[in-house]
Image: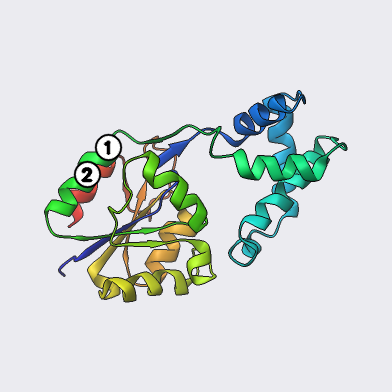
Amino acid sequence: MKIKAILFDLGGTLVQTSPIPEIFQKILQAHGVDRSTEEIEKARKTAEKQADIEMLPTLGDKFWFIWNAQVLEQLEIHNNVSLLAKRISELGWHYAKVELYPDVEKTLKLLKQSGFKIGLITNGLESDVREILPRVELMGFFDIEIASNTVGKMKPSKEVFLHALEKLDVLPHEAIFVGDTIEYDYKGAKECGLKALLIDREDNVKEEDVEKIGTLTEVLEHV
């Protein structure tokens, strides 16, 4: 089997960002509202249970406005909720720290130099990709960039992976997908016939039937 393409998830695989509660807290403080990160995390988890994440590709940025408003409701913030929800959506990336994991830059450059097609598949939005890639100096690096609203579906839907393969003009068995979640990334890619690798830098996953790598550089051992 000859591998021709390597596809990657984005958040948690290539880049790490500030925790959501920290971002929320900074924006709320800038608007005169004080809440602890613990309170925000509790509200976030409750809002997450209420939200239908499958609507993200359809609603786009509007989804996060609705989600932010639900978090604010859980925080019992009742004044200027629409304004605050809008500001959180607009300023989220401004207040977020975004950086590559230490093992990413070297690995991506080696893969590119070796002639592999390199792709990105994220459950984030195209607007998120546009915010993130310039900040980590990867703008224009990937041969394809697939976000949830690119196809109108999210991982683990087969349509997402098959669209990426079609764009790269490779067959499933000619591609590797690397991600940090079992359900969305590993199982989704594997069910489409790709070779799946789970990046587990902290060695948290103990399932024996999951093929893991501890650092991104280990991808080079599978090509």
Q: Give the amino acid at mark 2.
A: Thr
Residue shown at 26% from the left, 66% from the top:
175
Q: Label 1, on which residue?
A: 103
| Residue 221 at x, y percent in the picture | 17, 50
- Which residue reaches farthest left? 114
Please name the residue shown 59% across and 39% down the image: 92
Disc 1/disc 2 C-alpha distance (Å): 6 Å
Who is closer to the viewer here, 177 or 112? 112
In the picture, which quadrant includes the N terminus?
Answer: bottom left
In this rendering, the answer to whether 22 lies above or below 66 is: above
The quadrant the C terminus occupies is bottom left
Left or right: 65, with 124 as reference point? right
Q: Position of residue 76 (x, y in %)?
A: 86, 35
Q: Are marks 1 and 2 in contact (CB under 8 Å)?
A: yes
**Residue 21: x and y, percent?**
64, 32
Q: Secondary structure at mark 2?
A: helix
Which image quarter: residue 19? top right
Q: Is residue 72 left or right of residue 8?
A: right
Q: For residue 46, say whether it is visible.
A: no
Q: Secondary structure at mark 1?
A: loop
Q: Quadrant of residue 135?
A: top left
Q: Which residue is mark 2?
A: 107
Pick whichever, 211 or 127, lies toward us: 127
Amino acid, disc 1? Asp
How packed mark 2 is, by other alpha carbons closer than 10 Å (few <14, some 14-19, many 20 or more), is some
